[in-house]
Amino acid sequence: MKYVKTLMTVSLAAVMLMAGCSTNSSQGTASPNPTAGSNTATASNKPDISKEVKLKMYLIGDQPKDIGLVYDEVNKMLKRDINATVEPIFLSWGDYLQKYPLLFATGEDFDLVFSANWIKYGEQAVKGAFLELTPDLLNKYAPQTMKEMPKEAWEQAKVQNKIYMVPASTKDFSMAVVGVRGDLRAKYNIPELKTINDFEKYLETISKNEPNMVPFDEGINAYTMYDFMVGTELTPKLIIGNSLVSVDLKDKSGKLIDIAQTPQYLEFAKKMADWNKKGYWSQNALLNKTPIKDSFLAGKSASMAGNIQDMSLGVTAANQKHPEWKVELFDLYNGKATYVNPYIGNGMSINANSKNPERALMLLDLFRNNADYFNLTTYGIKGKHYELTADKKIQALGGTDSGYKIDSGSPWGWRTEGLIKPLADEPKEVAAIKAGWTKTAITNPLLNFVFDTTNVKNELAAIKNVKDQYRNPITLGVVNDPADAVKTLNNKDKEAGLDKVITEAQKQLDDYVKNNK
């Protein structure tokens, strides 16, 4: 793997030093959004943007139909403001796990990339995938971001005391919710859902009475049922990627737990095997790359599950086009402990091999702090994809037929608290669910811990192969004997060197706890 770590020394030599940088137009045009904040600057202290550059940006998600229309507008503004254009490229939900690491392993030529703790931000940073973002660089090319970003977010983004990500500045909940057809729940007199057992009764009823509908069209990216069955008991934060080794956030000691060896995980495995046999999802679930929300919105399935933001948008879209469905959201945590995601749950990094890192940072500064860029990339084109109501809420247009649904352009890497607008059609349940989670949310310094994987790279690669081969079938219940499958998983993890990785992680955690009392 080849990474150019001296790039900044070379490229910055050609750039004029400056005391401050404006996010406004460099060619005498006023900022399209005066409320986004601006620094008055003279030509002498602006970066040299005389040469037009074309940036390439990788995002995770499924490409919306109108992405070209939206980014045509984005690029008109970028050309005017920083003499640059950007091409967004999407790694689909069905393929990103395989394709994301290859971006760096193959030396792909690009500039910006979505990064997050759940796709091994720390591991990729240690490997040299991302450019180090020094305070000097950030102050020069992303000054608005430096003003807006919470200090804690920068601390969380540090890997070996260096920053490789511009995090989102929002705090989001990690817990999942389920969406169901309210009309079907009423038709079969099913009570409101409060627990995973209630959801199971709903799936059973659909399976018996709606033969042309998949109860829950789960696929290869399955995770929500694990959250509902294990997360409600252990409040886990994953520490070792591709394994289930976590800390329980109710415990501040930092003691690691291999959840794959707990009674809770065995019960989960048995339940998934039972659900699979009962046909609650397709027999081809291991090959199913269709996002669960898409199947639900197409009327093929009776339920969906995922993070509350995505599910909220799904409910809104469904009820716009099919108000007779009366889609509802339910929280299955039922008062159990919750936690708020770290800031590094979403962010953007710059490729270590980027030829234009300065302009890439300037783009991020605009996307994160200028309302016109933020609105375009998040909500689409005003008048076509959304309208602003009199009380400044976002009214999505087009429902499920919209070519650019809210957030469909995968803008999570530059989510900024002050620019997010309330949605006019947000399901009434959302506010109540978030309020409940806020009451049960726990704090723990371990939320900010990032595992340095330098000493265990080979073992982690082997553990990933184990996950793909042995854990994914357990998650979808595609096993003959779940107890035997779990035993095999644990044996294979051991053979792959998980014990060595746990020892390394525990050592780092112990040091972290000692230094963060």
Image: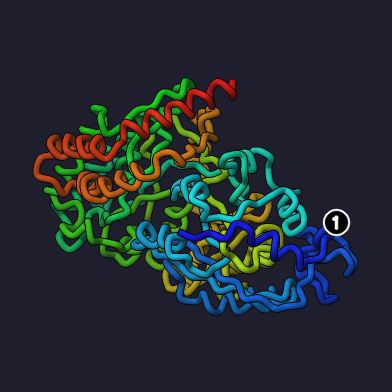
| Quadrant placement of the C terminus | top right
Q: Is residue 455 left or right of residue 146?
A: left
Q: By what rule are the colours in the image chosen?
A: rainbow
Q: Residue 317: horizontal and vertical position, in percent?
A: 44, 63
Q: Is residue 286 above or below residue 382?
A: above
Front residue of 50/227: it is 50
Q: Residue 161: horizontal and vertical position, in percent?
A: 61, 39
What residue is drawn where x is 27% and y is 34%?
Answer: 260
Number of residues whose C-alpha sits closer than 10 Å to that of mark 1, classed few (under 14), some (14–19) or many (20 or more): few
In which quarter of the view is residue 264 placed? top left
- Residue 121 showing in the rendered view: yes
> Which amino acid, mark 1?
Ala
Q: Residue 308: horizontal and vertical position, in percent?
A: 45, 48
What residue is drawn where x is 59% and y is 44%?
Answer: 157
Front residue of 431/95: it is 95
Q: Is residue 465 above or below residue 53?
A: above
Q: Is residue 403 above or below residue 333?
A: below
What residue is drawn where x is 69% and y is 73%?
Answer: 78
- Residue 335 showing in the rendered view: no
Residue at label 1? 19
